[in-house]
Image: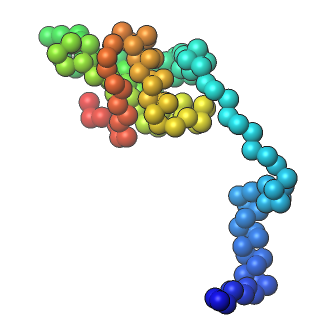
Amino acid sequence: MPKSAELTLEEGISIYKMLTKKFSIEELEGKIEETPKAVVTQEECTKFFEENILSQVDPSKTIFPNKNSFSKIKLFNSNGEWLFEYNTDPENSYFWYQFDRVYLILRDKFSLQDSALQALMKSLVESHFNLNGVTPKIIYVALIL
């Protein structure tokens, strides 16, 4: 039978301090039951998206990179920070969105797994940007203008 490890008082105190920084005493003692997460509706997500993300878009900062066509569009906030880029050309349609300023805000607000958030974003892109059949893609770094 393996011998159990013994802790010194100092090691025990260190572990206790580390655990109490992350968890409450009630959690450590098992007195708190985890509550199930509520289901997020498309309507809740849409409302939050419109009020907290889409409202940041500054129309005066909109860029149409192709001078001969208005199908490719880049959207920025008032600080000039990139939020979205999309192309409505049926031959090359896509929708990209920024990790920090879009994805993380939605993920943190609704505590969703990637697949659920992807489905919600797909619906938002279809309804707000009229891009049916396009799978939104997260971009982790700012795109070069």
Q: Quadrant of residue 140?
A: top left
Q: Quadrant of residue 24?
A: bottom right
Return the x and y of residue 74 as percentages of the image width and height.
32, 21
In depth, the one of 100 and 41 nearer the eye is 41
The answer to whether one can see residue 82 in this image is no
- Residue 44 vs residue 14: left or right? left
- Residue 122 vs residue 104: left or right? left
Residue depicted at 30% across the width and 34% down the height: 143
Return the x and y of residue 104 as percentages of the image width and height.
51, 36
Return the x and y of residue 91 as percentages of the image width and height.
17, 15
Scheme of image coloration: rainbow
Relative to 90, say whether 29 is above or below.
below
Q: Quadrant of the C terminus?
A: top left
Report the residue that reaches farthest toward the left.
68
Residue depicted at 36% across the width and 9% down the height: 130
- Residue 110 vs residue 65: left or right? right
In depth, the one of 38 and 103 nearer the eye is 38
Residue depicted at 76% across the width and 62% down the height: 20
Residue depicted at 64% across the width and 88% down the height: 2
